[in-house]
Amino acid sequence: MAHVELSLSEVFVPTAGTPAEQGSDNVGQWSSTVSAADEPCLLIGADARVVAISASGCELLGLGAPQDVIGRPLLDGGLRLLDFTANRGELTEPELDKIPPLLALSSGRLARGLLRVQGAEPDAPDATVDAISTPVLADGAVAGSLTFFSEV
């Protein structure tokens, strides 16, 4: 015969200074989380500028130190994306709009795809990363996108 056990705990009652609902500044909340994360991740604002990036994200994407990237446009901060052809050509403007972090911004939906990132040093090998992006909302509107990366 199955045995089920239940336990009761005290109800959480917020103190006077604790906000009862989630704050509307999701980008600010995610920024501190991404900055402290061990996982390779990136947060961009609605203007496609880097708001926060983890140290492991910088390392995986060959971007140097987080403080060198924060505040710069995502595609102007040293990130060099290549196509998957044998010629390794840089992605063109229409193709760049389809990378997961920017697609999540424009569509307001989850986006996923593979990216080929040129190594930071001329002789460094390229990295292929799987990118999963989600829009970050503030007051019901897309205010940025959060992306997690995994090397393939």
Image: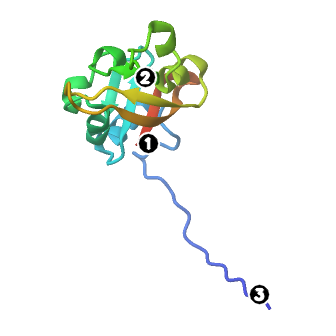
Q: Please name which of the two marks, 3 or 1, marks the residue nearer to the observer.
A: 1
**Image quarter (top left, top right, bottom left or bottom right) of the N terminus:** bottom right
**Image quarter (top left, top right, bottom left or bottom right) of the C terminus:** top left
> What residue does disc 2 label?
86
Task: Determine whether, in the image, residue 31 is placed left or right of residue 62.
Answer: right
CA–CA distance in space, label 2 to label 1: 18 Å
17 to 99, vertically: above or below: below
Snapshot quadrant of residue 150: top left
Q: Residue furthest right?
A: 1
Q: Earlier in the sequence, mark 3 or mark 2?
A: 3
Snapshot quadrant of residue 34: top left
Describe the element under mark 3 as helix, strand or loop. loop
In front of the other: 80 or 147: 80
Describe the element under mark 1 as helix, strand or loop. loop
Q: Please name which of the two marks, 3 or 2, marks the residue nearer to the observer.
A: 2
> What residue does disc 1 label?
152
